Image (spheres, helix red, strand yellow):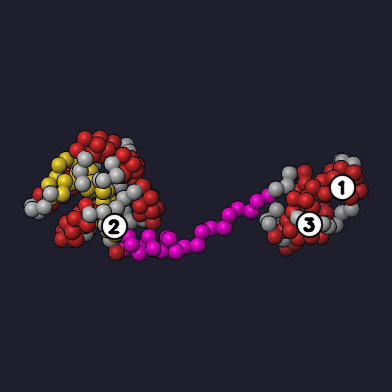
């Protein structure tokens, strides 16, 4: 017998789902919950095989409840049943540990079989949900932000170098000594792995530390 807990903030939805599942010979609804905190509490007390979990509930939402249930009750499977199919909702629910993700317009036979599959530990995804999840996984990761190892003063010196100023001119513009300018440049060379002014400017542009010539 598959023991099911239904978590949804709408009583009429809970009642409808309970009636739908109770007619199945291999299923019994052991409890209901109207929000995420109650879902966690009732799951801990009842230890169901499957929790049918809505996402948008007052207080602790379905993702938070799923995370808590799967962390403390590894044998309990959470099957999300919601009207929302945005990429963020899907990814957050799966990351929280949900075994499956279905939409509330799922036909009754599909839902019933999904509960059975979830109880066996199988992943169950509505076709549009599966497509979005695959697209998300295939999407290239955004490039990391450019790493700027230079101090603000070193960037100032390098900007002046990019404008063609000499060490003496940079010193006068920044009110520092020429020897200090040289020290800053040596540190810049070491941090960027270069050995002259031109390569330092080029490396800084490639890393996004300095804008390209057209943007200056």
Whole-number angstrom distance, CA of label 1 to CA of label 2? 62 Å
**Number of other residues with Cα within 10 Å of mark 1, as a class: few under 14, some 14 to 19, many 20 or more:** some
Query: Which residue is painted at 90% across and 44% down in the image?
Result: 179
Marker disc for residue 194 = 3
Residue 65 visible somewhere in the drawing: no
Q: In the visual, does 163 lie left or right of 214?
A: right
**Number of other residues with Cα within 10 Å of mark 2, as a class: few under 14, some 14 to 19, many 20 or more:** some
Query: Which residue is painted at 39% across and 56% down in the image?
Result: 87
Whole-number angstrom distance, CA of label 3 to CA of label 2? 52 Å
Q: Nearer the viewer, residue 167 or 119?
A: 119
Residue labelled with disc 2: 123
* Residue 134 on the magenta segment: yes
Q: In the visual, does 62 lie left or right of 16?
A: right
Sooner in the amino-acid sequence: mark 1 or mark 3: 1
**Number of other residues with Cα within 10 Å of mark 3, as a class: few under 14, some 14 to 19, many 20 or more:** some
Q: Tags 1 and 2 in contact by the CB under 8 Å rule?
A: no
Where, quadrant-wise, is the C terminus in this rendering? bottom right
* Residue 133 on the magenta segment: yes
Residue labelled with disc 1: 182
Q: In the visual, does 65 lie left or right of 190?
A: left
Sooner in the amino-acid sequence: mark 3 or mark 2: 2
Residue 140 visible somewhere in the drawing: yes
Q: Is residue 199 above or below residue 71?
A: below
Q: Secondary structure at mark 2?
A: loop
Q: Position of residue 18 (x, y in %)?
A: 13, 47
Marker disc for residue 212 = none
Query: Which residue is painted at 73% across and 63% down in the image?
Result: 214
Sooner in the amino-acid sequence: mark 1 or mark 2: 2
Q: Position of residue 213 (x, y in %)?
A: 75, 62
Q: Secondary structure at mark 3?
A: loop
Query: Which span of residues is magenta-colored?
Result: 128-148
Q: Nearer the viewer, residue 117 or 156?
A: 117
């Amino acid at each position: 017998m598959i023991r099911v807990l239904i978590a949804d903030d709408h009583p009429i939805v809970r009642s409808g789902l309970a009636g739908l599942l109770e007619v199945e010979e291999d299923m019994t609804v052991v409890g209901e919950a109207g929000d995420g905190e109650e879902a966690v509490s009732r799951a801990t007390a009842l230890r169901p095989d499957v929790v049918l979990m809505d996402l948008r509930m007052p207080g602790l939402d379905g993702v938070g409840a799923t995370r808590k249930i799967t962390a403390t009750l590894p044998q309990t499977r959470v099957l999300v049943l919601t009207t929302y199919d945005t990429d963020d909702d899907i990814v957050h629910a799966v990351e929280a540990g949900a075994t499956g993700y279905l939409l509330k317009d799922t036909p009754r036979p599909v839902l019933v079989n999904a509960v059975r599959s979830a109880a066996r530990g199988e992943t169950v995804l509505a076709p549009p949900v599966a497509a979005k999840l695959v697209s998300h996984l295939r999407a290239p990761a955004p490039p990391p932000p450019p790493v700027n190892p230079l101090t603000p003063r070193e960037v100032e010196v390098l900007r002046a170098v990019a404008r063609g100023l000499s060490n003496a001119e940079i010193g006068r513009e920044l009110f520092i000594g020429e020897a200090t300018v040289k020290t800053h440049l040596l540190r810049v060379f070491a941090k960027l792995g270069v050995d002259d002014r031109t390569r330092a400017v080029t490396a800084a542009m490639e890393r996004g530390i300095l804008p390209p010539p057209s943007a200056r």
